[in-house]
Amino acid sequence: MKVLLNLRKLAIDQLHEPIDFGDVDEKLLPIGVFDSGLGGLTVVKQLLLHLPNESIIYFGDTARLPYGTKSILTVRKFSLQIARFLQNQGVKIIVVACNTASSLALNVIKENTAVPVLGVIGPGVSAALRVSKSKSIGVIGTTATILSGAYKKVLKKLDPAVNLNSVACPLFVPLVEEGWERSDVTELIVSKYLDPIINTEIDTIILGCTHYPILKDVLHKVVDNRVIIIDSSIETARQVRSILQSENIQRPKRSKPTYKFYVSDRPQRFEEIAERFLGEPLPNVKQISLDDYR
Ligand code: DGL
């Protein structure tokens, strides 16, 4: 009931057209997931595996991608708009499936949102701490994520003794978007970026960007399987499951879940590339404008 009441309050607070949620059972409400584009689909994939009964609403801000080169203020503004949109759709939890938005905007989203909000930084860090023996961890991400120091902050809070080496890899996102994950050029670029951390004590690398799981094969090749690569999407899905369990808002099995995918630019390209992220085609992606969610 708490989520439902909060949703009603929010619809009134924000002076948007009040939404009548009627007598909706909050267990049936969807999980809201967003990313700057399609990288967040790596999280959706894990949610589908870990929570097959749950409905999902996904928003990819394809018109304003990339976030990884933008300022804090801009990323916060965009993220808040999306969080408002998702709340107006009646989601029961918001998953910020974008490392840049999680690094720069998670607290602001939490402060302005009436439902539980989970980012991808905490789950990635927890997974890395569980497996690292040398206590020397690497994180790779967009320029904005690395400059924000968000990973360091979360990691040091959980284990002050851990040594963290961060590397911004701004070329990885365009390489993935181009579909070049198996190209020689990509292997060369991956080697160049990882060079400063490859022959160090690091035994674990966190993929601090939603696009990077697509590069897992080439990353494994470059680090020669000596280093454990952490894909935070798996741990994120596990943490969503435990939040839904502790709040007692899991969707019961009795009806089929629904999936809705929205983007802010034309859907065709999203649909094409989405197949690589999800491993299956994504029909019915709708384009919407966030202009009303200021
Ligand atoms: N989704 C972003 C992230 O995880 C990568 C793409 C972008 O720069 O917008 O950091």
Image (tube, helix red, strand yellow):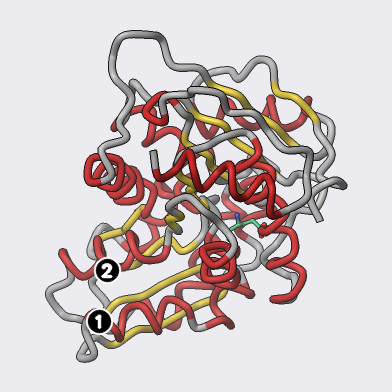
Q: Secondary structure at mark 1?
A: strand
Name the disc covering residue 204, or none: 2
162 left or right of 61?
A: left
Which of the two labelled residues, at mark 1 and mark 2, occupies the earlier sequence position? Answer: 1
From the image, tell me which residue sits under label 1.
136
Q: Is residue 190 above or below residue 249?
A: below
Residue visible at 69% across and 26% down? Answer: 272
Give the x, y percent position of residue 289.
84, 39
- Whether residue 72 appears in this view of the structure is yes
Alpha-carbon span between mark 1 and mark 2: 7 Å
The residue that appears at 40% across and 84% down in the rendered structure is: 153
Q: Quadrant of ligand 1?
A: bottom right
Please state if 286 lies on the left or on the right of 6 as rendered: right
Judge whether 16 appears above or below 208 on screen.
above
In the depicted view, which residue is nearer to us: 4 or 108? Answer: 4
The crowding category of the residue bearing disc 1, from other C-alpha atoms within 10 Å (few below 14, some 14 to 19, many at least 20), is some
Q: Position of residue 15 (x, y in %)?
A: 78, 50
Q: Is residue 219 above or below residue 263?
A: below
**Which amino acid does the dot numbered 2 rest on?**
Thr
- Considering depth in this image, is 252 or 271 the residue closer to the camera? 252
